[in-house]
Amino acid sequence: MITVKNLTKSFGPRTLWRGLDLTVPAGRMLALVGASGSGKTTLLNCMGLLERPSGGQILYEDTDLTRLGPGGRRRFRRDRLGYLFQDYALIENATVHANLDVARRRGTRPDHTRILERVGLAGREREKVHHLSGGEQQRVALARLMVKQPSLVLADEPTGALDSDNGAMVVDVLRQMSRQGCTVVIATHDDDVRDACDAAFDVHRQREV
């Protein structure tokens, strides 16, 4: 479970939101919605410790993430967090297999073949990432999440570069992860993604819709 309490984020004189409260339990999938510029990605980045809020708390289970030092933030990202970025954040000059293997937890032996089949990339393990299309890279990033098996997933417009069939597949995988107990938060403009989630939170209005 992740809980945001009285969160404020400002950039100079501009305040994106003030006093924002939000709780997402384990096993739930929440869509962050709202107009462009309302701060959906910024909220994800605060929850993922990529940006610092201007005020308030972010609690993951019993840990106040806003009080963690550099080592604690690094361990949280390594051990708990899975992030599906708009720009994929892959190692472009490495193979698909290498990009998956870097997410493997110590002591685990994930089935890369099965995972790549699930995301429609069977037999592509040895291809370099920079040879893949944007949609294929997004699916590699999704496969990397499946290898890591995080307890919290933050996804920023995960279907933006995909056709409708592959977009539905991404949502299905994220839904499966939530059913297995993962907390999933998705920033999206896509009504189909929103409708597939358990609930939607309008970042601008600061309430569920």
Image (spheres, rainbow, N blue to C red):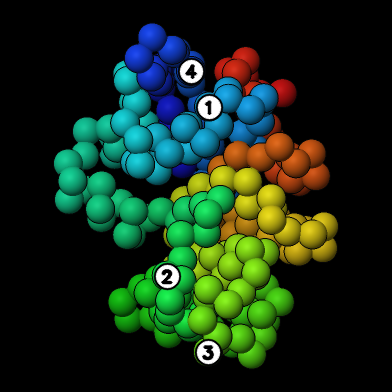
Give x and y (percent) for residue 149. Answer: 47, 65
Give the image quarter of residue 197: top right
Q: Nearer the viewer, mark 2 or mark 4?
A: 2
Q: Which residue is mark 2?
A: 91
Which tag, 3 or 4, sits closer to the chain's start? Answer: 4
Kind of residue at disc 1: Gly
Q: Amino acid at mark 4?
A: Leu
Answer few, some or many: residues within 10 Å of disc 3's Cα (few below 14, many 20 plus, some between 14 and 19): few
Q: CA–CA distance between discs 2 and 3?
A: 13 Å
Question: At label 2, which amino acid type do we have?
Answer: Ile
**Residue type marked 3:** Arg
Residue drawn at x 55%, y 85% as measured from the top left: 127
Determine contact: label 1, label 4, CB under 8 Å: yes
Q: Is residue 108 above or below residue 38?
A: below
Residue 50 shows up from this direction: yes
Tell me whether the residue at label 2 lies in contact with that at label 4, contact meaning CB atoms closer than 8 angstroms.
no
